[in-house]
Amino acid sequence: MACMLIDGKKIAGEIQEELAQEVAALKEKGVTPGLAVILVGEDPASQMYVQMKGRTCKKLGMHSETIILPDATTEQELLQRIDGLNADPRIHGILVQLPLPSHIREDRVIEAIHPDKDVDAFHPYNVGRMFAGSPSFLPATPAGIQQLLLRSGVETAGKRAVVVGRSNIVGKPVAALLMQKGPGGDATVTLAHSRTRDLGQVTREAEILIVAVGKANFISRDMVRPGAVIIDAGTNKVDDPGSEKGYRWVGDVDFEAVKDVCAAITPVPGGVGPMTIAMLMSNTLRAAENTLA
């Protein structure tokens, strides 16, 4: 079976080209979309993501601010920073890079961001609107997954979709998007997780299988239905003495084992990751457009 590789880097590039034109049109109206990213601490992976977001903003012609705070920053100090950004007319989107140090409550931080600037779509107001089918913003990774399916010509209507993982960031919202009415939706969705009995039996029913559990090569060949479309949202660092860096990145799906049985699959890296940043930029643009409404 010839398996199609769903190239997230290519699709994200196409989306960014579209966004760049929209940003230019908005700037002609006197509005430059602005994104502020706050990083607390020195987590290397978080630093890399923040740098990528800043570079993408610049590439698209957006205004970008990166605020790096020390690990010892108090919750109150962080909330005060967010209050300042909420009131700053140059900033249309606010993103606080997760995870945060253990002494800072994530829910307090998420709820401090004004819903109109919550481009991560983590605020309970925006989560509720999404589940109700009238979103202000869609969370970036789930929206990116939906765009991967749409732009790859994968029909979701009437299909049996299985989502493995129930996080608030990927699992729950992507299940909600797939079951909504309209393009990229109308699927029959099962949300599986660590307490699901006989997980392999459940995943073998999936015509569309989306995996976000954070465990390297968790999905094996015998867990995949022949002809399934697989979206791998996992990013796991594994030791690889044979590589120059001594490690490599792999997904939650055993790519080499399943690539001959599935109809289409996203690679890791180069699949879901680039889409997340593209959709974050899309949300920032929408937030800026909303100021003209």
Image: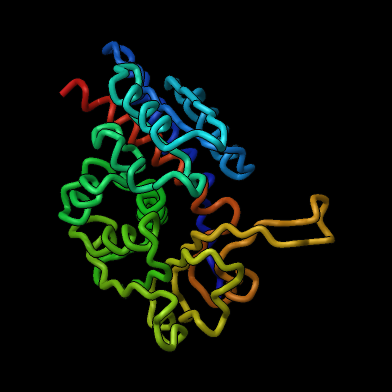
Q: How far across and how far down the image is residue 27, in percent?
A: 33, 15
Vertical comparison of 247 with 12: above or below: below
Q: Is residue 86 visible?
A: yes
**Towards the viewer: 70 or 85:** 70
Split into 4 quadrants, where in the image is the N terminus?
A: bottom right
Q: Quadrant of residue 145?
A: bottom left
Kindly identify the residue that appears in the image at 42 percent across and 27 percent down: 36
Q: Quadrant of residue 282?
A: top left
Q: How far across and how far down the image is residue 237, in percent?
A: 66, 58
Kindly identify the residue that appears in the image at 83 percent across and 61 percent down: 241
Q: How far across and how far down the image is residue 127, in percent?
A: 25, 51
Q: So how many labels did they put on this image?
A: 0
Split into 4 quadrants, where in the image is the C terminus?
A: top left
**Towards the viewer: 222 or 226:** 222
Q: Quadrant of residue 123?
A: top left
Kindly identify the residue that appears in the image at 52 percent across and 49 percent down: 273
Kindly identify the residue that appears in the image at 38 percent across and 63 percent down: 171
**Towards the viewer: 266 or 291:** 291
Vertical comparison of 168 with 222: above or below: above
The answer to whether 201 appears left or right of 243 in the picture is left
Q: How far across and how far down the image is residue 12, in percent?
A: 47, 42
**Towards the viewer: 97 or 288:** 97
Vertical comparison of 230 with 20: above or below: below
